[in-house]
């Protein structure tokens, strides 16, 4: 049985929650392997809509074990707020597992995140202000706090003191902010220890054993390929690796265990925050995509920037992730356009470029080159098979598949759990 990676093939918000939920009934484990509560998945089950930020989408599937891997940064206050919300709605969250090696987001991380963004002014990155970047920075600087540290008060106090020794200097002397007391942070973090303890496990061992036993493990990326800290539109990126390689380091599973890599593509393109976006629309079409698609960030509440489908970044996602399949979402949003532009290449300094430029300057100045495909007006939300789609919708899907470099194995035709056309099984 396979171990699958499921990730965003654009700038995030592609509909990974819907894809994960589609597989949930057949999957034994769903693993978040990077990011924190800066991600957001919307899952619709029947007439119930769930907005998940930190928890794996598989937590909504009975029989599935949700896992937060070592590559995730965890804000314990957000974690328990989200768990409480699901429990109040009758969702069983008792099977959740959390890696003891995952790093914690502390109160000083969120403080530093917010004051730094304000300090940058026009040069700001567009972070969510939730402390994600500073937590990852501490991890790399080897002054981070891990989940397991909550269970040894002496170690926790030493680590918090070491982290704040420098940060308080910065807060006071650079940002004119009050220094943060070590004891206050330690006390707040220790307050989560007893409740957190039952969830904590050696998740790498558990997942490797599960794969060896033939169980199905799904690794779920939190953001999109173009937000990867190494392979995205740096510096307008997240602070971790939501690409397929990140699944291995963020969950403690070797690459030879991965059998399939599924990229989630929206039938058009969106992004949240600052950074280049060649196909972005500033006209009525952009506003229509935003309104019809409900393009508002699940976590941030910010309106998403909207544009036409970009085949260049889809091909790039195929290459850097080794994608074996695509799940195309929100095809129904495009219903009603007489013709639909698709970006097939860029014009940079008067030259046609068909691959994503590695230069930040070139990408910033890239102008989309469009091909125009005929649209459709028929309602497709009731379609159950590919043949149920209007011919122009079928042709649109086939064209995107050919341009993107991997087969489209499933299509989302509506927000509901059952509004999906499965062409080829992922399992």
Image (cartoon, rainbow, N blue to C red):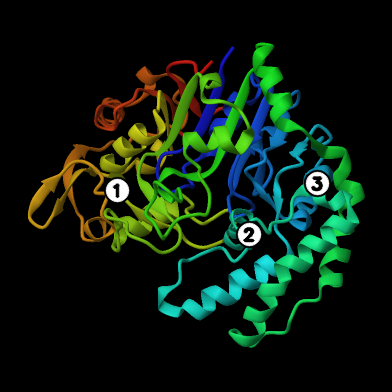
- Identify whether 325 is placed above or below 68: above
Q: Residue 217 sits in which quadrant?
A: top right
Quarter of the picture containing the N terminus is top right
Residue that mark 3 sits on: 148
Q: Residue at x 73, y 62 (%)?
A: 106
In the rendered structure, which disc, 1 or 2, sits on the residue that comes first in sequence? 2
- Identify whether 187 is placed above or below 322: below
The residues tagged by marks 1 and 2 sit, at their Cα atoms, a distance apart of 38 Å
Q: Position of residue 419 (x, y in %)?
A: 52, 30
Q: Position of residue 268 (x, y in %)?
A: 35, 44
- Identify whether 383 is placed above or below 226: above
The residues tagged by marks 2 and 3 sit, at their Cα atoms, a distance apart of 16 Å
Residue that mark 1 sits on: 308
Give the residue at the far right of this rendering: 194
**Residue 313 horizontal side relative to residue 147, left or right:** left
Element type at mark 1: loop
Residues 28 and 377: in front is 28
Element type at mark 2: helix
How dense is the environment of label 1, judged by Cα within 10 Å: few (below 14), some, or many (20 and up)?
A: many
Residue that mark 2 sits on: 138
User: Mark 1 or mark 3, which is nearer to you?
Assistant: 3
How dense is the environment of label 3, judged by Cα within 10 Å: few (below 14), some, or many (20 and up)?
A: many
Can residue 225 be seen by looking at this rendering?
yes
Element type at mark 3: helix
Q: Residue at x 28, y 62 (%)?
A: 283
The residues tagged by marks 1 and 3 sit, at their Cα atoms, a distance apart of 45 Å
In the rendered structure, which disc, 2 or 3, sits on the residue that comes first in sequence? 2
User: Mark 1 or mark 2, which is nearer to you?
Assistant: 2
């Amino acid at each position: 049985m396979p171990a699958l990676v499921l990730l965003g093939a654009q700038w995030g918000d592609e509909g990974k929650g819907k894809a994960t939920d589609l597989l949930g009934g057949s999957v034994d484990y769903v693993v978040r392997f990077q990011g924190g509560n800066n991600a957001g998945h919307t899952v619709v089950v029947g007439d119930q809509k769930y907005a998940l930020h930190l928890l794996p989408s598989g937590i909504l599937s009975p029989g599935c074990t949700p896992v937060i891997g070592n590559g995730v940064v965890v804000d314990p206050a957000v974690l328990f707020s989200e768990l409480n919300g699901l429990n109040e709605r009758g969702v069983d969250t008792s099977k959740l597992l959390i890696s003891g090696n995952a790093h914690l987001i502390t109160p000083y991380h969120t403080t530093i995140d917010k004051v730094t963004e304000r300090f940058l002014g026009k040069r700001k990155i567009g972070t969510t202000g939730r402390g994600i970047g500073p937590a990852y920075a501490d991890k790399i600087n080897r002054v981070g706090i891990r989940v397991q540290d909550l269970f040894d008060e002496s170690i926790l106090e030493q680590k918090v003191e070491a982290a704040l020794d420098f940060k308080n200097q910065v807060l006071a002397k650079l940002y004119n902010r009050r220094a943060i007391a070590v004891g206050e942070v330690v006390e707040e973090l220790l307050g989560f220890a007893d409740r957190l303890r039952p969830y904590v496990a050696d998740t790498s061992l558990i997942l490797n054993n599960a794969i060896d036993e033939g169980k199905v493990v799904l690794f779920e990326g939190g953001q999109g390929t173009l937000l990867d800290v190494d392979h995205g539109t740096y510096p307008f990126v997240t602070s971790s690796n939501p690409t397929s390689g990140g699944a291995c380091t963020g969950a403690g599973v070797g690459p030879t265990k991965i059998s399939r890599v599924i990229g989630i593509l929206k039938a058009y393109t969106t992004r949240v925050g600052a950074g280049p976006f060649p196909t972005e629309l500033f006209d009525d079409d952009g506003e229509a995509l935003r309104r019809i698609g409900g393009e508002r960030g699940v976590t941030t509440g910010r309106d998403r920037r909207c544009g036409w489908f970009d085949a260049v970044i889809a091909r790039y996602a195929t290459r850097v992730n080794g994608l074996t399949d695509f799940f195309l979402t929100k095809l129904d949003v495009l219903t009603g356009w007489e013709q639909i532009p698709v970006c097939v290449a860029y014009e940079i300094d008067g030259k046609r470029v068909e691959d994503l430029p590695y230069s930040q300057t070139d990408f910033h100045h890239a102008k989309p080159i469009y091909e125009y495909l005929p649209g459709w007006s028929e309602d497709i939300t009731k379609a159950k098979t590919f043949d149920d789609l209007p011919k122009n919708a079928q042709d649109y899907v086939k064209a995107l598949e050919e341009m993107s470099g991997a087969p489209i194995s499933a299509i989302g035709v509506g927000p509901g759990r059952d509004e999906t056309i499965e062409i080829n099984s992922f399992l």
